[in-house]
Amino acid sequence: MTSKPCNVLLIQPRFTAGSFWNYQETCKIVGAKYPAPPLGLITVAAMLPQSWTLRLVDWNTQELDDADIDWADIVMSGGMLPQQPSTLAIIDRCKARGVPVAIGGPDVTTSPERYEHADFRVIGEAESVIADFVDAWQRGERSGLFTAEKFKADVTTTPIPRFDLLNFADYTQICVQFSRGCPFTCEFCDIIEIYGRVPRAKTNDQMLAELQALYDLGYRGNVDFVDDNLIGNKKAVKAFLPEMIRWQKERHYPFLFSTEASLNLADDPVLLNMLRDAGFFTVFIGIESPDPDVLVATRKKQNTRRDIADSVNKIYEAGIFVLAGFIVGFDEEKESVADPICKLIEDAAIPVAMAGLLFALPETQLTRRLEREGRLHPGHDQSDGDLGDQCTSGLNFDTQRPRAEILTDYRRIVDHIYTPQNYLARVRQVIDRLDMSGPNGDLSRARLKKDASEFIRIFWNLTVRKPEHRRAFLSLFFYCLKRNPRALNAALIMYALFVHLGPFSRYVVGEISKQIEDVENGHWQRPVLEAAQ
């Protein structure tokens, strides 16, 4: 594509500061600034004309100066719901300096009205409309709306992301994507609304080319497959993994992989073994609730008709440790759910359990149902507070159970699972259960320098710089050396995560306690429609 030169500033908006997922203290002890880079923005960057000059500012890792904006002919930004306040601030700053701004990503796709004052809005997947956007810009148009047809983007045409725009040292992991979409119909999930229920996968050669690009740029370490369900298209992933295994072996395993998948992963030992042999070391799974009635009502049927703890254990037996999500506040909760959820987390030995309050996301089945029932809080100003962080801002609707009871349950869960004693007891159980006979238990020649450096950093930080962790960390360290030394990397990661999660859980308990007090004292009121509406 030939085009006139153009200076493009790509800005990754800041995520909510107080978040389960930002792992700020964990990042510090491994020498990083943020967990992950902006995969969406660097993928869009690869779709732009080669004659355009691109700069990337990740506002999570560096400051955004006015001089950066002044350099640009156009600013491109956008992201997810927790980034909404920051994205709106970027629009305002660009407007003030007379620089056109284009916004895309999941949040503008599901809530386009929030971004009406942006010069350009890209709704849906960029692959389908990026050429139209570039043509409009070249014609001199300085505003516009570009809407992609839903679920039609051909991901086999998606170019290799511009990994060269990243400073790898800023992040604990680098992200790639194999597929989009999920076959399930969970009521509260927005993935199927944005990307559809028929997962579309890249080709094997295409995916290997992305890994090779990272390898050629010198990156070694954790690569996260950000697919919302990596096994949503089992046929495609099973066809890809043997190629991935071969690629890893030929290069002495330069990467460790993480991803997200549904719990039915445990039903397929062949697939589990392939993931292990490819170098996957951890997987996030949405469990949500131990109550079958809740799972059925919320259309999470893939988690029913099974022993959840046993399913998690089968994943451990493949040498992959599990992070899991749980949600409190479903209509079908007939009584206190604190004890059953805590028991499941303990029985399954899940150290990192993301317990959150139910939040009705825009354009989901849940939101549409609550609107029909007159229970949604439409006047809730989503630009305030810890937007999108389900730990401290949830229940944006009239609940079936008394609100104070739900909040009390939630506080009990967070308070219980993140005490040092309970968390580290689960880590020890994981160490005992992990079968590390696969490549994840080996020392990688390709990662030796990076792994050694990270080990020294973690050991130094947890024994010298943070002496309050010394005793517990060394106890876990020697326990792992004695019981399952090949699981040492997993043990270090799980302890490093607790450096963030321990204090964050105390913050959540405090914030939820304030909310409970407000409800019990009658200070909490249902939000009302804003005057502008």
Image (tube, rainbow, N blue to C red):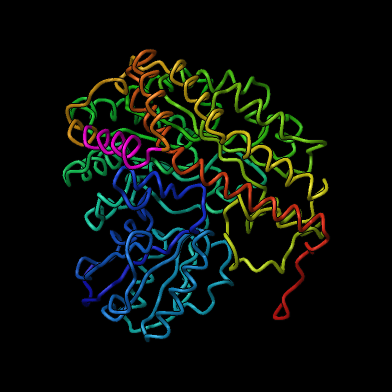
Quadrant in the rendering for residue 437: top left
- Relative placement, left or right, of 28 versus 290 is left
Residue 508's place in the image compared with 291, above or below, is below
Q: Please provide the residue range marked out in magenta.
A: 452-467
Q: Residue at x 33, y 82 (%)?
A: 139
Quadrant of the snapshot with the C terminus: bottom right
Quadrant of the snapshot with the N terminus: bottom left
Q: Residue at x 82, y 58 (%)?
A: 521
Q: Main secondary structure of the magenta part?
A: helix
Residue 426's place in the image compared with 528, above or below, is above
- Relative placement, left or right, of 291 versus 206 is right
- Give percent across and percent down for residue 203: 33, 40
Quadrant in the rendering for residue 81: bottom right
- Give percent across and percent down for residue 251: 18, 30
Residue 311's place in the image compared with 183, above or below, is above
- Give percent across and percent down for residue 424: 49, 27
Q: Nearer the viewer, residue 316 or 115?
A: 316
Q: Residue at x 33, y 42 (%)?
A: 465
Does the magenta run of residues contain 41?
no
